[in-house]
């Protein structure tokens, strides 16, 4: 989806975490290595890493899903033997790693976390939605940009093309998430695919600490922001606040991506497929991490592509 909606205010707290049995924000660490190898291994999206990590902790007593963070050591080891792979940082990086795993038949990754939909048509992969997120603009709360900040898509396109260089008397520094980020891809698509100018810098997605000057502006996941501010995950929002785009935010589904040929596998099916799947049934966990549940659409296998 790509519709505008208003910011959701996350109502998460430590007491809720205890009620769900979630050790937050400890759940955002890689599964223990080598003592904690699990049945299914996944990696990719920074946006959904924390919620999928938490699902991995609560589903089947923490034995089914291993979810590896987008950042950390340069490699991750996903199986007891072999399978030391370059750590995928972002949705596209996770999908690329999954495609390579399929091509090489290595069996090191079973799914990719993704905050974007299909980029290349085809049927090799199935994008299984499990929640909804929003993306909007973040700026520093001590900046003049934080004065009724509501930009149009056209303004943002011009900013990221470096044609608009000041706003409210402040010199702009537009930032984008790292290459391979689903948020980067989704945001650029949503504002009209600008021809990026030389003024655009990079940051690790959803790390507000990296907005360290008055003119910095960057896309940010509303779910990640709410989870950070409310203590569900490690707080890295820094001094950022969220603005609006065209009076609201861009809405998107988030996915776990699996090889289409594996949909008939009983473990993949039980874990991801259908509103009654193990992932979709954990609505309290999904909402605790700032996301909106999507009801009967959760676990759909309709969306397919090659990347």
Image (tube, rainbow, N blue to C red):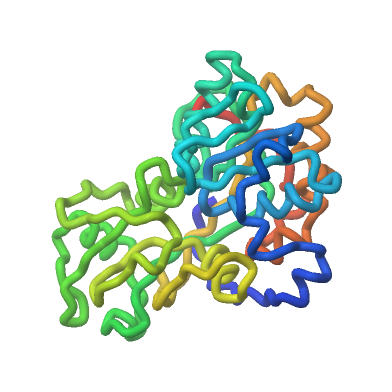
Residue 154 vs 254, above or below: the answer is below
Q: Position of residue 144 (x, y in %)?
A: 26, 84
State the image quarter where residue 18 is shown: bottom right
Residue drawn 36% across the image and 48% down it? 178
User: In the drawing, does residue 156 fall left or right of residue 66?
Assistant: left
User: In the drawing, does residue 115 fall left or right of residue 60?
Assistant: left
For the image, the number of numbered tags is 0
The answer to which of 99 and 22 lies nearer the viewer is 22
Residue 162 vs 88, above or below: the answer is below
Residue drawn 67% across the image and 50% down it? 53
Residue drawn 63% across the image and 74% down it? 10
Residue drawn 63% across the image and 33% down it? 111
The answer to which of 234 and 12 lies nearer the viewer is 234
Which residue is farthest top? 104
Q: Position of residue 1 (x, y in %)?
A: 55, 51
Q: Where is residue 214 in the image (x, y as percent from the top left)?
A: 25, 77
Residue 197 vs 26, above or below: the answer is above
State the image quarter where residue 205 is shown: bottom left
User: In the drawing, does residue 120 fall left or right of residue 282?
Assistant: left
User: In the drawing, does residue 231 fall left or right of residue 271?
Assistant: left
């Amino acid at each position: 989806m790509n519709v505008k909606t208003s910011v959701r205010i996350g109502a998460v707290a430590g007491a809720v975490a205890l009620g769900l049995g979630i050790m937050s924000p400890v759940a955002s660490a890689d599964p223990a290595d080598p003592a904690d190898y699990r049945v299914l291994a996944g990696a990719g999206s920074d946006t959904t890493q924390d919620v999928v990590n938490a699902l991995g902790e609560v589903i089947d007593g923490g034995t089914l899903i291993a979810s590896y963070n987008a950042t950390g050591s340069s490699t991750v080891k996903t199986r007891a033997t072999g399978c030391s792979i370059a750590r995928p940082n972002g949705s596209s990086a996770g999908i690329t790693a999954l495609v390579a795993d399929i091509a090489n038949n290595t069996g090191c990754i079973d799914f990719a976390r993704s905050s974007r939909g299909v980029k290349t048509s085809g049927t090799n992969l199935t994008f299984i939605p499990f929640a909804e997120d929003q993306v909007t603009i973040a700026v520093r709360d001590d900046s003049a940009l934080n004065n009724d900040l509501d930009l149009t898509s056209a303004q943002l396109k011009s900013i990221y093309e470096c044609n608009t260089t000041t706003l409210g008397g402040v010199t702009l520094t537009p930032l984008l998430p790292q290459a391979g980020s689903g948020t980067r891809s989704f945001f650029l698509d949503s504002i009209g695919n600008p021809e990026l100018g030389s003024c655009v810098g990079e940051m690790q997605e959803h790390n507000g600490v990296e907005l360290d000057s008055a003119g910095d502006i960057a896309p940010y996941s509303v779910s990640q922001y709410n989870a950070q501010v409310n203590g569900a995950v490690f707080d890295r929002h820094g001094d950022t606040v969220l603005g609006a785009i065209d009076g609201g935010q861009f809405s998107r589904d988030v996915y776990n991506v699996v090889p289409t040929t594996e949909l008939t596998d009983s473990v993949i099916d039980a874990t991801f497929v259908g509103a009654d799947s193990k992932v979709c049934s954990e609505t309290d966990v999904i909402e605790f991490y700032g996301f909106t549940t999507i009801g009967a659409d959760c676990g759909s296998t309709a969306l397919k592509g090659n990347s």
